[in-house]
Image: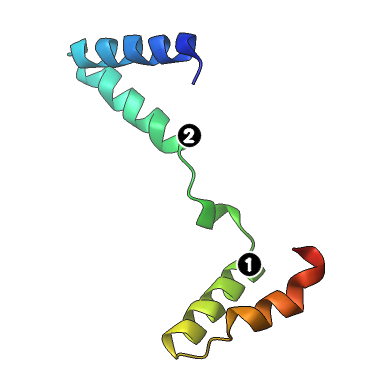
């Protein structure tokens, strides 16, 4: 990691540890929530359905061997 960025992060940590104003802390928490996105919320419904289908198949022990998957997708690997 860039040393300059690391120094800036350390300065932010020091600054955060010194904040006593509750309103600033609340604003920072809200900012973090807005900036932190869950990948699940960003994918399509079709992708979610596919993942859920795969998880259900795994729960039901309906898995295919790795060798079969490699053969099926070998042109893209």
Query: x, y percentage for residue 50?
Result: 61, 74
Indicate whether 71 appears above or below 60.
Answer: above
Report which quarter residue 46 is drawn in: bottom right
Residue found at x 47% / y 8%: 4
Q: Is residue 10 left or right of residue 41?
A: left
- Residue placed most toward the observer, 9 or 50: 9
Report which quarter residue 24 is drawn in: top left
Q: Is residue 28 left or right of residue 40?
A: left
Query: x, y percentage for residue 39?
Result: 53, 52
Tag 2's secondary structure? Answer: helix
User: What number is the disc on residue 35?
Assistant: 2
- Residue placed most toward the observer, 57 or 27: 57
Query: x, y percentage for residue 52?
Result: 52, 75
Tag 1's secondary structure? Answer: helix
User: What number is the disc on residue 47?
Assistant: 1
Packing grade of label 1 (10 A; few <14, some 14-19, many >=20) is few
């Amino acid at each position: 990691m860039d040393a300059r960025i690391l120094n800036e992060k350390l300065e932010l940590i020091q600054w955060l540890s010194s904040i006593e104003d509750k309103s600033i802390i609340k604003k920072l928490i809200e900012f973090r929530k807005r900036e932190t996105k869950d990948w699940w919320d960003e994918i399509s419904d079709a992708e979610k359905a596919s993942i859920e289908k795969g998880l259900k198949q795994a729960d039901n022990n309906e898995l295919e061997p790795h060798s079969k998957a490699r053969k099926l997708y070998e042109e893209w690997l």
